[in-house]
Image (cartoon, rainbow, N blue to C red):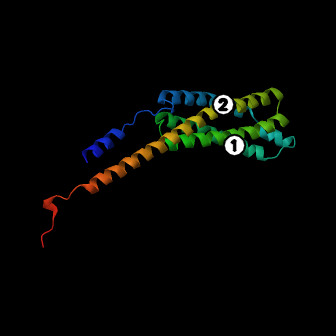
Amino acid sequence: MAVCAAWGRQQQQPPQPAGVETPWDVRKILTDLTAQSNQLKPLLTQLDPQQWVNKGASSTYTQQWLTAQRQLQDVLVSTQRLAQKTDSLSLALDAYFRLEALEITARSLDEGAQRYALRPFADKLNEYVAQSFGNRQRLRDYLQDLAASTEQNFKIADEEAQRCRGMISKEAPSSSKKKKY
C-alpha cells in the first residue's frame, strides 16, 4: 500500500511526456497566434460593411463584422489563459475552437472584401486568413498531442489503481479488526 501512495504523490507532478511541446514552446506558439490576431484588429477597424450593403451586399456582413470583433477579443483572452496553464486540455480546446470560429468569420468577410472593398485591403485580409491556417494548425497538433498524452496518463493511473486495489484486497485482515460474537 505504501508503494501505491508513493506512486500517487509522484504522479502529481508528471514529467513532460515525449511528443508534447514544452510549456515555453507552447507559449511561443501562443505568442505568434496573439501577434497574428493583433494584425487583424486594424483590418477589422478599416472594414466598413455598411458600404458593402450600399453596393448590394447582404446585411449579414455587418453582423459578421461585429462577430469577428468579439471573436478576436475572445481569442486573445483564451490564448492568454492557455499561456498561463499550457497543460490544460480544456483551455487548449477553448483556444483552438475560438481560433477556428474567428477564421471562418474572417474567411467570410474576406469573400465580401474581394467583391465589395478595395483590392489592396481585400488582399491584406486574404493574407491574414492564409497565415492563420498555419498557426492554427500548430495549435491543433499540440492539442492532439496533449489529448493523447492525457489519455495515456489516465490509462496508466487507472492500471496502477487497479493494481493497488488488487494488492489491498489480497492483504490478510488484521486480527484486531475481527468481530467477536
Where residue 134 sits: x, y (%)?
Answer: 66, 31
Residue 134, numbered circle: 2
Residue 34, numbered circle: none
Few, some or many residues within 10 Å of mark 2 (<14, 14–19, 20+): few
| Nearest the eye: 180 or 9 | 180
Where residue 66 sits: x, y (%)?
Answer: 69, 43
What residue is drawn where x is 51% and y is 44%?
A: 90
List the single residue furthest toward the right. Answer: 56
| Res 16 → quadrant | top left
**Could one spot residue 41 in this view of the protein?**
no
| Nearest the eye: 26 or 146 | 146
Q: Give amino acid for label 1.
A: Leu
Q: Relative to 171, say whether 128 is above or below.
A: above
Residue 66, numbered circle: 1
| Nearest the eye: 144 or 121 | 144
Question: Element at badge 2?
Answer: helix
The mark that comes first in sequence, 1 or 2, is: 1
Q: Give amino acid for label 2.
A: Gly
| Res 99 → quadrant | top right
Could you tell whether 56 is left or right of 170 in the image? right
Few, some or many residues within 10 Å of mark 1 (<14, 14–19, 20+): few
Residues at marks 1 and 2, CA–CA distance in whole angstroms: 25 Å
Could you tell whether 128 is left or right of 177 in the image? right
